[in-house]
Amino acid sequence: MYNLTFKIIRCLNLKSLATRLVKMQKYCFSASYLLCCTFCSLLQVSHSSEMQIYVPLIDKICLIQQIAIRQEILDSIDLFFINASFKSCISYSYSDFKLHNHSIFAYNEKTRSCSVVYDMPEENTIINCSEHDLQFYKVIHCMPAEGFMYTFEDEVEENVTRISTVKLKATAEICIVERHPFSENFLLKRSGRLFLQSLELCFAHCRVSLVRGNCSAVLFSSDERVCLLLQQNQPLQSTDVMRKSTSQFFTVNYCDYNITETTERRYYNGTGKITNIRIDDRQLQCTVHEIPLLRVHMKHRSLLWKSINFQNCIQFCGQQFQTNLCNAVYFEAEGTTCLHLLLNASQALYEYSENNKETVHFIEKCVEVTVRPELQQESAIYSSQSDEMRTSPLSGEGSSRTYNVSEQATDFFHYVAAENVQEQYVKLYEFLEVCKVQLLNIDVVRNAFTIQVSRKIYSLNRCLHICRRQTTCIAVLFSRLNHQCKKVFQGYSGMSIIVHAHEEVVALKECFKAIRPENYCAMPSCTVT
């Protein structure tokens, strides 16, 4: 009898109501536990199960409430679980917030799996009193994190090294960084959000953005692999107490180049190597020189991204060479990072030094060569695809920055034969981006699973937009016949997806950000709001 009473007290989590509940012993003795929990909801104590959580994927503070689904409703719906952290699950659920004015999801802490619950009326939910592994939550509201005034740190103090040295291979630098209490990040202006594998890469991207004056600190969330670039516009509050938090907040205090160079300079008299670069139906032959990396070169950094290999790195720089956006690259082979540089073309070959181990590849010039007729015909076939897959030139003023859709996706479809892959470019108007995609002629997608979009989708372009919103989405299956869109995610080894005859498999590879919205809007059907 008393055990039942204290279960209800724990359900309510309000000490002030404990005395009142003890007086209910006679009632609860003959009532079911679920009925008593329903009574909890009638007392309107929902605030006892509400909590505020910082969600890195969307950089928002979300107010969520633990709820329960009525058993008869739960039995009538299907739950499709994916592997995700609790905070990632909140972000996936929030993406549908505007459609339903609330978002509900299920989460299993033991298996770290998540399922979004669609089209669930609020009258079918009650205050949660469940002690099972599967818990249900409702996203009530999310607000921007910048300027938020409350703390989200654990009460437990953490003994960490505040100031440390880190080596950045991607930018050939050694930096002194300082860790600060997590909540102080809310005071800083947001200048960018990236999805990276390591804290080291997060620092490197901040250093490249510093050339434009846009980054002096970072917030890195290792579980979600989210790197937030921050711009410090006011002094931070000094405190000696560091408490536990799921995200780490650092300022970049000082950096120096990890480059050994001599004062002796001479003209580089090498002939260079010829590299073929393809831009749409044009082919360029570029003269590329390998010259030593100098400190002065690093002052002209413009872009850092994760490349498949060196050839892919120099290829994209060559495409931007025509519009004077890139004329050299520093490729770091261990991390396969590609750093774009825009060097002074008249001085680059006059600053040669033989004693430097690190090198950059400088594009001196590019000349257009005649394309064979069969290649022109092949290009024409590609150009005759539907409007939503129309090829867009990357050499124009509308492409300056590149965003890897998923760092794991670069070689995910490595098992597909080259003759079954067609590379094209698609315009994602809502993001002001041109994205490289691959049309795959395959019957089975290996080591992956899909999540079907609940509503009907009438174009492949819209399906790709939906995939682009989730950083872990690597491809789509689209059916023009049934107006169905399925998002493809990386799964365990042995998992497979059967591709039906009416479905198209399209993989998202890389997206290139537009420099100026007005130039991007010159593309068909584009509007900027």
Image: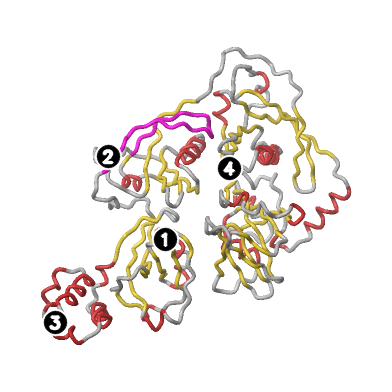
Mark toward the viewer: 2 or 1: 1
For residue 468, side relative to residue 81 (left or right): right
Residue 188's image quarter? Answer: top left
Residue matched to label 4 = 306
Label 4 element class? strand
Residue matched to label 3 = 25
Contact between marks 4 and 3 (CB within 8 A): the answer is no
Residue matched to label 1 = 112
CA separation in Å, label 1 and label 4: 28 Å
Mark toward the viewer: 2 or 4: 2
Q: Name the amino acid, label 2.
A: Asn
Q: Position of residue 55 (x, y in %)?
A: 39, 56
Q: Residue at x 37, y 43 (%)?
A: 249
Residue matched to label 2 = 159
Dot 3, how many residues are within 10 Å of its Cα: few (below 14), some (14-19), or many (20+)? some
In primary-sequence order, the first of circles 1 and 3 is 3
In primary-sequence order, the first of circles 2 and 4 is 2
In primary-sequence order, the first of circles 1 and 4 is 1
Q: Name the amino acid, label 1.
A: Arg
In primary-sequence order, the first of circles 4 and 3 is 3
In primary-sequence order, the first of circles 2 and 3 is 3
In primary-sequence order, the first of circles 2 and 1 is 1
Q: Position of residue 122 (x, y in %)?
A: 37, 78
Label for residue 51? Answer: none
Looking at the rendering, the stretch of residues picked out in magenta corresponds to 158-179
Mark toward the viewer: 4 or 3: 3
